[in-house]
Image (cartoon, rainbow, N blue to C red):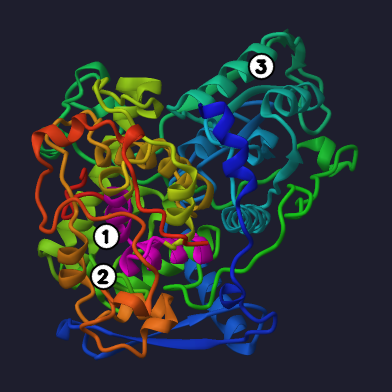
Amino acid sequence: MVSILAPSISSSIQPLPASFRPAKCFLAKSIRRRTNSKSLGRTDQIFWVRCGSSSSDSNMDNKAQSITEDVFRKYSSSKLVRKGKGVAIVWFRNDLRLLDNEVLVRAWTASESVLPVYCFDPRQFGTTHYFGFPKTGELRAQFILEGVSDLRRNLQKKGLDLFIEFGKPEKVLPKLAAATAAHTVFAQKETCSEEVLVEKLVRKNLGKLDVTVGGSLDGASRSSKTLCPKLELVWGATMYHLDDLPFTTSQLPDVYTQFRKGVETRCQVRSTFKLPPSLAPKPKKFVDGEMDWGTMPTLEQLGLQARQQSPLGVMKFVGGETAALHRLQDYFWEKDCLRVYKETRNGMLGPNYSTKFSPWLAFGFISARYIHEEVKRYERERVSNDSTYWVLFELIWRDYFRFVSMKYGNAIFHLEGPRRVKGVRWSQNKELFDCWRNGTTGYPLIDANMKELIATGFMSNRGRQIVCSFLVRDMGIDWRMGAEWFESLLLDYDPCSNYGNWTYGAGVGNDPREDRYFSIPKQAQNYDPDGDYVAHWIPQLANLSKSQRHFPGQAYLKPVVSLKFANSGRPRPESNKLDFSKMEFKSGGNSGGFRGRSRRF
């Protein structure tokens, strides 16, 4: 059934409605949102969305670059000593930054020159495993392109450059190692099967080489030897280091609270890695012009069509370390939003209800350790409260899902989940799923969130929990369809967090207690009581009274399914044994599982 369904779902993706296509020369637009937090010091938060260019854009870019340069200076150390010989390759993966990058520092220390490399792996622009959605959507691809360009600029400022090629790492890296006589390829260790397979292929192909190493950069005589370049993998994706955990991954607690208490009481977060003042020199063959650094591909060359993030979005997400450091500076230190994070984090409109760090964390444009250090500095210099702690609390959730992926492997991608839950027969009803993903279910809170996802690549954490619960609990749809749709569209897609959260939402995650139903009426009442959010994304609701916006009756689409529960709480025990594949749904005719207070997608 899966193989038959996949092409029909993929071919049914429709272009965005015209209302979501921003004007080509949209220079700037301010959107105000009302906030109930008096602590923010104002009643209206203004944010700017940029498409194209303007003088304000230039000023913003200059400010971001100035912040980055200041941070680099602060975290540079002349005490770092370079002891190695020859050439070392840095294979950038999901660690696209200079600051707090152990891979980069170790390669620099172990060599006379470093060759930084980024591969645009064609497999990342294929289709998802089960249902054939685009594996990387246009908006995330653009975000990656921006981030890789920013990485190249920052390396150039430090005396290096970035080699860029469209190709499979297991082919590109051995070729470069042979051409430059590199003795080691350094890279960040990943945990999921696709990424681990690439690591194995790179190591295998490097092992087939015999390269002569030992010649000096200045041409002076030096004894040389022939060897196989090695792949050295470095852990760097989490706030708490793998080697510092108080338990092995096989003994990882299945309950988050137990994990959190274990690391908080028995672990220390390591300090960030400092940078050498300069990363020069470049490898000799690049200095002599024998090899060039390659060019950035375009979206069209990646098989995608250019599309801007909608100006209706919460903010303009720009890829790269520069934008990430600017965001932290703005949210923590300039707008002082950190002190009220816990009170505002469940919002859905505006740039500052939450940190919005997740897209930059997903690609390693900023490290969790650096955020930890800045939170601790904020606590020393301004205030330490529940909000400052809660940012770290969410980062621990992110760590947890990474370690869960190591414990359970591919089970996080399988229908029955890590717990191998039996007895649930999920539906793969294409028409119902299309209503969900296109935002035409007839429930404004669901539809608004799904329209935001399509138009911007982002959705609030609260929204993700609600739409997941609706898909798996009220529609009875195979949770993997939702997970793969998120995989395709999200700017902040990370397999560990994405699939970890979806398994929890479907009631098949490693923690059996995570099995909660999200009631749409209650969620609307609690988090969008005036209907401002749904009216923002569904303009036809704006003219209705606030009390009608979430349940507009005939003024909106007819609901495609009935809600199973009117109030929040856990489903009845027997609800998880329903045969969703045989349920009858209303045709409609339209073209659980999360603890909302404690986890970030």
Question: What residue is disc 2 on?
Answer: 347
Q: Inspect the image, locate mark 2, and give the three-letter code of the amino acid beneath it.
A: Gly
Give the distance between the C-alpha atoms of the residues marked 3 and 1, in whole angstroms: 47 Å
**In the rendering, at what x and y percent does residue 101 appear?**
47, 43
**What residue range appears in magenta?**
441-470
Name which residue lies at 47% across and 70% down.
Answer: 67
Q: Is residue 590 visible?
A: yes
Question: What residue is disc 1 on?
Answer: 462
Disc with the residue nearer the chain's start (2 vs 1) = 2
Q: Secondary structure at mark 3?
A: loop
Q: Inspect the image, locate mark 1, and give the three-letter code of the amino acid beneath it.
A: Arg
Q: Secondary structure at mark 2?
A: loop
Magenta region includes residue 455: yes
Q: Is residue 382 visible?
A: no
Most foreground residue, 290 or 474: 474
Name which residue lies at 63% across and 52% down.
Answer: 148
Q: Inspect the image, locate mark 3, and give the three-letter code of the amino acid beneath it.
A: Pro
Disc with the residue nearer the chain's start (3 vs 1) = 3
Q: Is residue 193 left or right of residue 510?
A: right
399 in relation to 323, above or below: above
Q: Nearer the viewer, mark 2 or mark 3?
A: 2
Name which residue lies at 70% across and 27% down.
Answer: 173
Q: Badges 2 and 1: C-beta atoms under 8 Å apart? A: yes
Magenta region includes residue 516: no
Give the distance between the C-alpha atoms of the residues marked 2 and 1, in whole angstroms: 7 Å
34 in relation to 308, above or below: below
Name which residue lies at 23% across and 83% down.
Answer: 35
Q: Main secondary structure of the magenta part?
A: helix
Question: Are there few (<14), some (14-19), or many (20+) residues within 10 Å of tag 3?
Answer: many
**Dot label at residue 229:** 3
